[in-house]
Amino acid sequence: MDGYALRHDDLASQGGTTLPVSQRVTAGDIPQPLIAGSAARIFTGAAIPAGADTVVAQEQCAAEDDRVTIKASTHLGQHIRRAGEDIEQGTSFMQAGVRIQPQAMGLIAANGIASIPVFRRLKVALLSTGNELLMPGEAMQAGKRYNANHFTLTGLLQALGCEIIDLGTACDKLSATVNVLKYASTKADLIISSGGVSVGEEDHVKAAIEQLGTLDIWKLNIKPGKPLAFGHIDDTPFFGLPGNPVSLFVTFCLFARPFILRMQGVEDALPQTITVRAQFNHTKEGTRQEYVRSRISTSDHGSAVTPFGQQGSGVLSSTVWANSLTIIPPYTVITPGDLVEVIPFSELIT
């Protein structure tokens, strides 16, 4: 606070005290001890002179020549930041297993620390599968579609600070899938593929993993995202995510993202949920746990959540419109006003 540093005991009980100004202290100066019965002109960020215990804002003072009159009542210690009030000397201010967010970078720097040990960036091999895929910019052809999943995954992995090894697109042949996955296992810390994990004759990822290593998970009781493969090729973990773009987005956020965070050393890797009132009906009792793309909105009446109108697993626009996933457990009916559990996207894509 720009103002005057003084001893609180030097002020009259009713205000209106006039004191001589004995020194001027700006940020970065080394002040002299305060002369008893005087005030020091002081500016924001400056060190407090020894002996001073109160700062009065300049708006509450009247200065004339080398004297200042305190016009307002004050209290002892006002406008002073005590040494150690943020972090006491000798205490730990960050623990291992915490992501270094921008505010943490500031805190580290504020303590004069130039470098800290961190986990290296994860190398993630990214593979698309499917004869039907085209890259954006190519001319559309009958029976083809643009490879949205590659770019969704690239953005999600970049947000986690991963180093991406782009494996391109594997054609729908078992031998091609086996060869590219075997190569990836020697180059990456983690492999993620999109598509080819269902039960069709042209879905070869499951068979390739079983041929090369072990398949630990296949199929989840969730919607969207039932087909999901997880296993290992030698010591390299593998996620086979669904080909439907919304299913891929949801399963990555719910399963691959926490797994990646734990590989990066993060202790608290699971997304946090909040409770919001539903602004919709859900009358059909499903047998799978549903993750509904939804939007949280706030009004004078509080927060409420509304689902996107189309919940198909190919409706990628719903993930752009939405800012959250609303969780609907199996065999659950929702009516407007019910409390529902919601995962904000801020917990899933940053």
Image (spheres, rainbow, N blue to C red):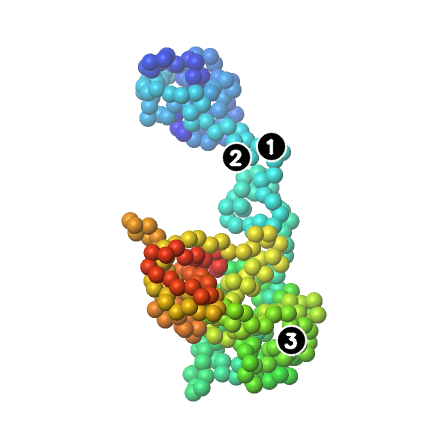
Q: Does the residue at mark 3 contact the one at mark 1 (Cβ under 8 Å)?
A: no
**First in residue order: circle 3 vs circle 1:** 1
Real-space CA distance between mark 2 and mark 1, rounded to the nearest whole angstrom: 10 Å
Secondary structure of the residue carrying numbered label 2: loop
Residue 53 vertical placement versus 85 (above, below): above
Residue 129 position in % (x across, y down): 55, 78
Q: Residue at x 52, y 44 (%)?
A: 106
Q: Residue furthest left?
A: 300
Q: Residues within 10 Å of mark 2 (few under 14, many from 20)?
A: few
Of circles 3 and 1, the one toward us is 3
Secondary structure of the residue carrying numbered label 3: helix
Residue 209 position in % (x across, y down): 64, 75
Identify which amino acid the numbered label 3 is placed on.
Answer: Ile
Q: Does the residue at mark 2 contact the one at mark 3 (Cβ under 8 Å)?
A: no
Residue 227 vertical placement versus 44 (above, below): below
Secondary structure of the residue carrying numbered label 1: loop
State how many labels appear.
Answer: 3
- The residue at which mark 3 appears reads as 209
Inspect this view and state whether residue 165 appears. no
Q: Residue at x 54, y 78 (%)?
A: 198
Identify which amino acid the numbered label 2 is placed on.
Answer: Asp
Real-space CA distance between mark 3 and mark 1, rounded to the nearest whole angstrom: 53 Å
Determine which of the numbered discs, if any, sits on residue 86 in the image: 2
Residue 31 position in % (x across, y down): 50, 23
- The residue at which mark 1 appears reads as 89
Residue 19 position in % (x across, y down): 38, 14
Q: Nearer the viewer, residue 66 or 295?
A: 295
Displayed quadrant of residue 78 = top left
Q: Residue at x 43, y 17 (%)?
A: 8
Identify which amino acid the numbered label 1 is placed on.
Answer: Gln
